[in-house]
Image (cartoon, rainbow, N blue to C red):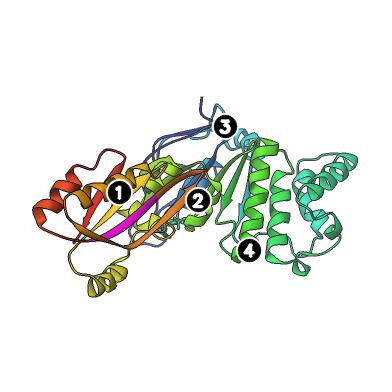
Amino acid sequence: MPLITLRNVSKTYPPARRGEEPVTALRDINLEIEAGEIYGIIGYSGAGKSTLVRLINALETATSGDITVDGRQVTGVPERQLRQLRLDIGMIFQQFNLFNSKTVRNNVAYPLRVAGRSRAEIAARTAELLDFVGLTDKADNFPEQLSGGQKQRVGIARALAASPKILLADEATSALDPETTHEVLELLRRVNRELGITIVVITHEMDVIKNLATKVAVMDGGRIVEQGEVFEVFSNPREESSRKFVSTVVRGVPSAADLATLRNRHEGRMVTLSFRDGGASQSDVFVELAAAGVEFELVYGGINDISGRAFGHLTLALKGADQAIDGALAAVGHGIKVTELN
Ligand code: ADP
């Protein structure tokens, strides 16, 4: 059974003021997240990502549909039954949400104090967590004395304090520079691998998904427009909005502006060849084109590596009779997709 299941979930916020319209933030969401996964939720601002996670940890209630977490019903249950659920879910945020007047140690200890754990237990667990995130030497510092990356490591230690099964990360690296992002992502990978914690990452940064997640759901206008293995979604996005998103990190697909520049520089038809896993089929294309007497020039392209699997896109400018070009491209086998650029 999946650890987190959403079935036909919708969420409409009532109007904030009289005369305003209600806002439907989620529409008919179906999602299953297995234990041990790192699941990415991506989409532009306003797509409904935060609402989705707030439903998972019951900070908001769904307007319709069913949500279960670890076999427990989340929708339509009384508040006191949600307490255990919230202990099972840790959360980290873009702005870290640390207590500025508490030391690093006391920030991490806070959830344990609230849960009424003994002093000895709190001391031992806090020390263990600070060691895990590499901040033992900062235990007595205050958040303002830390870098952004260190603050987020405190956030992670605090989120892990009550030994949750699930960690929700809401734009957790969006306020960090690329180098620090890399460090925090590495720590999150360890949280998943070494502690077996399921992680749900919400982000508008495709790089985060590419470097961290195993599965991904792409959201647009309150719906999940596409979901699956990160490699599948990145190498062959089916929906326009996923394609737009994916193109920001996938090397090799010319943007509209790139294409205009290419057209100024090269004559003839242009096609992008998309291939996956290995390069054998690329050379088939070149052989077919040469055999048909079509001249070609490689004008744009790149190879990507995601989860140890490769895929890429090569754009060719082709010169020759239309019939010869069409014949050569039609002869290209499976495993390679040809897109004509207009
Ligand atoms: P994202 O996290 O992808 O940026 P959100 O879930 O925050 O998206 O928002 C989805 C939509 O719901 C937006 O139109 C937003 O304005 C609206 N929304 C979010 N939270 C509230 C709220 N508490 N009250 C009313 N509308 C909200």
Indicate yes or no: mark 4 CB to ligand 1 under 8 Å: no
- Residue visible at 30% across and 59% down in the picture: 315
On whether residue 160 falls in the magenta region, the answer is: no
Q: Amino acid type of disc 1?
A: Glu
Q: Main secondary structure of the magenta part?
A: strand
Task: Indicate the position of residue 98 as horizontal and vertical percent values.
Answer: 70, 59
Q: Which residue is mark 3?
A: 35
Point out which mark residue 210 bears: 2
Q: Which residue is mark 4?
A: 179
Task: Indicate the position of residue 145 as horizontal and vertical percent values.
Answer: 78, 69
Point out which mark residue 239 bears: 1
The quadrant of the image that shows the C terminus is bottom left
Q: Amino acid type of disc 4?
A: Glu
- Magenta stretch: give its range: 312-317
Farthest-out residue, right: 120
- Residue visible at 49% across and 58% down in the picture: 205
